Image (cartoon, rainbow, N blue to C red):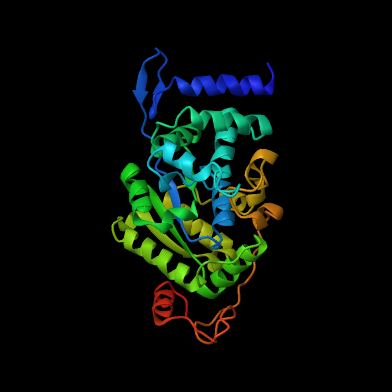
Amino acid sequence: MSRSGVALEMHREEDVRPVGCKLSPNGHATVTVLTAPLIILAPMRSYSTVVSAMLGQHPQMYSLLETHLFTCDTMRQWWSCYRNNHKLMGHGLLRAIAELIMGCQSEVTIELARRWIVRRLAWRTADVFRVLARRVDPLVLIDKSPLIVNRAEHLDRALTEFPKARFLHLTRHPLGFGRSFLKFFEDMGTSAAADPQVVWHRQHSNILSFLATVPQCQQLRVRGEDLLAAPDCHLAEIADWIGVRTTPDAINKMKHPEESPFACFGPTNALWGGGDSYFFRDPKLHSSKVKASSLEGPLPWRRDGGEFSTEVRELAQQLGYG
């Protein structure tokens, strides 16, 4: 059978299994208890692509690209939002479905993934996430969709659907975030619609308000700069919190994000989306000491000499930036 034929057979198999169930040897559906997922909470341009890829290389974890599933309630809504969204936003889920359900990422399986979604427009997005989680279970499935932090309802949906989920709050200094945020839009050939410090403050405020409703044992905050500067220490901390192995071998595997099946651009019909294009071009871990940045003084992107607002400085200090 050809590769596309194998993919079609896998596609049909997934159709007949109830979501959240598997078939027992006697053919009856049995309810499965999925391993609780890990959801990374971070604004865009906050190291989430490389950190997610690193964590996903742990032998007991598996990381996805940006699926944006929790930003919508139904797949029909998701399809309406992301199928034609400036060629980027839907590609992460297409690549995940191609890899996990169809068996590989190719132009053929990406097209099959599109059809797979269209046939499930009546599904809830959480059920699609459960299908992906079941494909890797008992590994911890990792989701890193920055758009989830835009609105409280997105965050609430994730917790409601997966009440045992763990949430990793990943931060970046507002100055580094601002510079990277503006460079991203510049490289896209457009301009940012807002001062990046406003975006940074709003999204981290959303995260903190949400985490106030989450049990302490299910949340951890890590500064991205610290993790990249001392990966062994912080990867071990995260692994211990999640409850997976912290052996030297497991930590070393996490230092090779380039081994992820998603550490590259996708096929031509899902080329750009799903993560940071800068990471796709050079997916190896580059451990480096990030220079300390001040919260005082004029901002390089403000022509009027404007500085960080009082609210931004206070929140940054709360997150550990001096």
When the figure is inspected, residue 143 is found, relative to residue 297, above or below; the finding is above
Q: Quadrant of the N terminus?
A: top right
Residue 293 in which image quadrant: bottom right
Q: Residue at horizontal 36%, vertical 15%?
A: 28
Residue sitting at x 28%, y 57%: 213
Q: Position of residue 112 (x, y in %)?
A: 59, 28
Residue toward you, 31 or 15: 15
Residue nearer the viewer, 96 or 29: 96
Q: Residue furthest top?
A: 26
Q: Nearer the viewer, residue 301 or 258?
A: 301
Residue 14 vertical position relative to residue 308 in the rendered view, above or below: above
Rendered location of residue 176, percent (x, y)? 57, 72
Q: Is residue 12 left or right of residue 28?
A: right
Instruction: Classify residue 70 as left or right of residue 305.
Output: left
Hey, which quadrant is residue 281 in on the image?
bottom right
> How many numbered callouts?
0
Q: Is residue 124 depicted above or below 222 in this figure?
A: above
Residue 53 position, x and y percent, is 58, 50
Percent position (x, y) of residue 266? 66, 42
Residue 248: in sight, yes or no?
A: no
What's the residue at 64%, 60% (across, down)? 188
Q: Is residue 76 visible?
A: yes
